[in-house]
Image: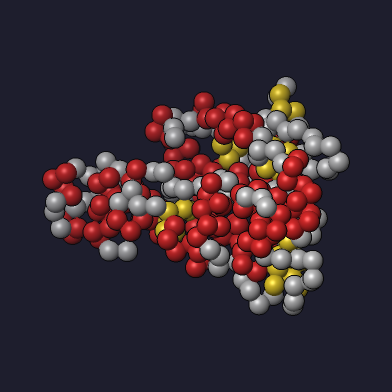
Amino acid sequence: MNDVTLKNVLHAKGVISDSEAALPGSHVLVDYETGKGVADEINRAVAVTVLPQVLNTSRPIVAALMDEGLLPQLHDGGLKVGKISCAVDREHVDALLHRIQKYASPVAEAPRTMVSLAKSAEISRKKMQLVLALVFGGRLKRVMRLENEPGLDGLLVDPLEVKSLTPRCRPGMSASCAFMMLGVGATAGKRLLSEQGGRVLLKAVKLPGEEEAWITPAAMACFRSRYVTLRSLQIELKCSTSQLKRRLAVHEVKPAFDPRSFGGTLYRRADLPKSMEI
């Protein structure tokens, strides 16, 4: 990263003034932790233009991933400059690729009934967003990946299964997908769905014939407006874990529940200082 990029982002975020932005980078002084946080933010940004290469897929599928909320775009004003004007957080990209490796069974060749995501959308006559919602929502019983084809282009699904499920598709995602998006493990995820302190933190609905709970966009938005996980807060504030913990300690912010028994660290947004409001 060059000093001009860093200086432009610092300026866009209001960290440095207009007059400072006009100076050479070596003449501009900023707080170390603030500067490092912004630099880390830039380094984690993956430009949307390179996502097809990173994910080994087409631009329409990348667009569908973003439209479906599986790859949230970075909307921070400080990122709307230069080469990182349109980007996603690398951690979301890595989580998506990890999910493929974990849940798709590897095969050397595609079985006769299995086809690529694009071909599946074509055969089933369904929008790619619906196909992706089924794949990453954990609703398909058969998801495979070609051993020699990384990323999304190596994914294989059964178009007949896609066609049979899409009429029952509802907006939202499976509970396991919601946990991945929030950055919590299975133990904390179960706690979110059960009653804590007299209320259910993350409301879910049961779909007929399915074992896994389903999380609607409204339920997800309600949860995010009231609570935030340590991992999500770190991504929102673009800082390291140690930096975030120091800031929370300074303001004496305590977790909403005991992290050891809860299985993760969760904070009430109402307890956060105004400097941490998103």
* Figure disc tally: 0
Identify the residue at image location x=41%, y=43%: 75
Left or right relative to 25: residue 43 = right
Q: Quadrant of the N terminus?
A: bottom left
Q: Residue 202: x, y in percent?
A: 68, 32
Place of residue 117 in the rendered image (x, y in percent of width and height, measured from the top left): 65, 61
Residue 68: x, y in percent? 58, 46
Q: Quadrant of residue 251?
A: top left
Residue 207: x, y in percent? 80, 37
Question: Considering depth in this image, is 35 or 23 the residue closer to the camera?
Answer: 23
Q: Is residue 90 visible?
A: yes
Which quarter of the figure is the C terminus placed in?
A: top left
Left or right: residue 88 compared with residue 157: left
Give the image quarter of residue 273: top left
The residue located at (55%, 65%) in the rendering is: 57
* Whether residue 98 can be seen here: no
Q: Is residue 267 above or below residue 64?
A: above
